[in-house]
Image: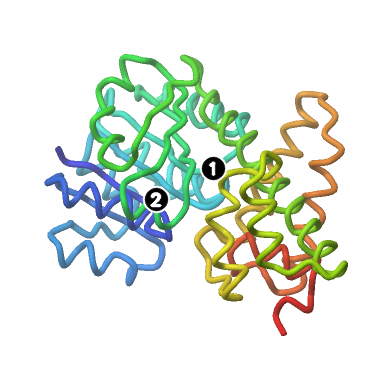
Amino acid sequence: MKIGFIGLGIMGSRMAANLQKAGHELVIYNRTAAKADLLVSGGATWADSPERVGQACRLVITMLSTPEAVEEVALGYDGFLKALPGNSLWIDCSTVNPSFTKKMALHANKMGHRFLDAPVAGSLIPAEKGELLFYVGGAENDLNQVRELLEVMGKATIHVGEENGAGTSMKMVNNMLLAQAMVAFAEAFSLGTSLGISEEMLYQTLLNGPTAAPFLKLKQPKITKRDFSAEFPLAWMQKDLHLASLTAYEQKVAVPSLQITKELYALAQQSGLGEEDFSAIVKLLKPDLIK
């Protein structure tokens, strides 16, 4: 199948590579062209604009960092939506807010196209291994048309609901818990070591007990080795928390602990940790960790 793929960052490049390995023909675009080199060397076709992607494909996948980036490639001067043949399908795997997703779906529908929001749970390594989890919002018939493609990139697909925005809603609350659990562990880790408990004892006791989120075991090596190279950049987590806060305001829902967590990640961003993994929040709460 010929697939347009726009957005070749940490996640998108690996998702596209798995599609390519499965034998699919790719037409790709990325703002930084050099990030497409490996895929092009493997047979992908480079498009010099999102519009060119739309002209070449009936299925387009986007995996971008912010709502603004998604809107620009879809509806901008050289956006792909206006170039797609009628009744094409756009799958947006970006992590964005539900109200934005609904706006993009409306634009796509008005232009005669179908839309699925399908953000993913997972970071660099699951993306590389094709073990992502897709949260999908949109028509089940459209999902069934591309389910096999999602299974190439992921280990499971959850159809959250028939309405667009259902997938991004689930991803949003998922990332809220992810960010808050990381902060909670960082605080416990900082206090525990200050009381003389060894790091190893904290890892063994907390991470094998019932109170810690399972994903924290995957972050232990980063803390142990003081290697916070990005699997999921802290700046992206701050963005996700900002969008969750915005959504809570739109829904008139109180989320006080989210607001505190969001500001902690903002402080970490101001402290220069934005390009590191989001687990680097421990360095904000325990600065001596990097010594």
Q: Identify which residue is drawn at 64% across, 53% down.
A: 237
| Quadrant for the C terminus in the image | bottom right
- Residue 28 spot, x, y in % from top left: 27, 54
**Whole-number angstrom distance, CA of label 2 to CA of label 1:** 16 Å
- Residue 240 spot, x, y in % from top left: 64, 46
**Residue situated in front as seen by the camera: 18 or 84:** 18
Q: Identify which residue is drawn at 25% across, 55% down.
A: 17
- Residue 136 spot, x, y in % from top left: 44, 27
- Which labelled disc corresponds to residue 95? 1
Q: Identify which residue is drawn at 83% across, 44% down.
A: 259
Left or right, 79 with respect to 256, comes to: left
- Which labelled disc corresponds to residue 126? 2
Count of marks, rendered view:
2
Q: Quadrant of residue 213?
A: top right
- Residue 284 spot, x, y in % from top left: 78, 68
Above or below residue 162? Residue 241 is below
Above or below residue 246? Residue 230 is below
Colour theme: rainbow
Instruction: Provide the secondary structure element on which disc 2 rests.
Output: helix
Q: Quadrant of residue 210?
A: top right
Left or right, 94 with respect to 169, comes to: left
- Please report whichever mark, 2 or 1, sits nearer to the chain's N-terminal start: 1
Q: Which amino acid does label 2 sit on?
A: Pro
Instruction: Provide the secondary structure element on which disc 1 rests.
Output: loop
Q: What residue type is labelled 1?
A: Thr
- Which labelled disc corresponds to residue 66? none
Query: Cβ–Cβ below 8 Å for labels 2 and 1?
Result: no
Above or below residue 291? Residue 114 is above
Local crowd at mark 2 within 10 Å, few (<14), some, or many (≥20)? Answer: some
Q: Identify which residue is drawn at 26% across, 45% down.
A: 4
Left or right, 250 with respect to 20, comes to: right
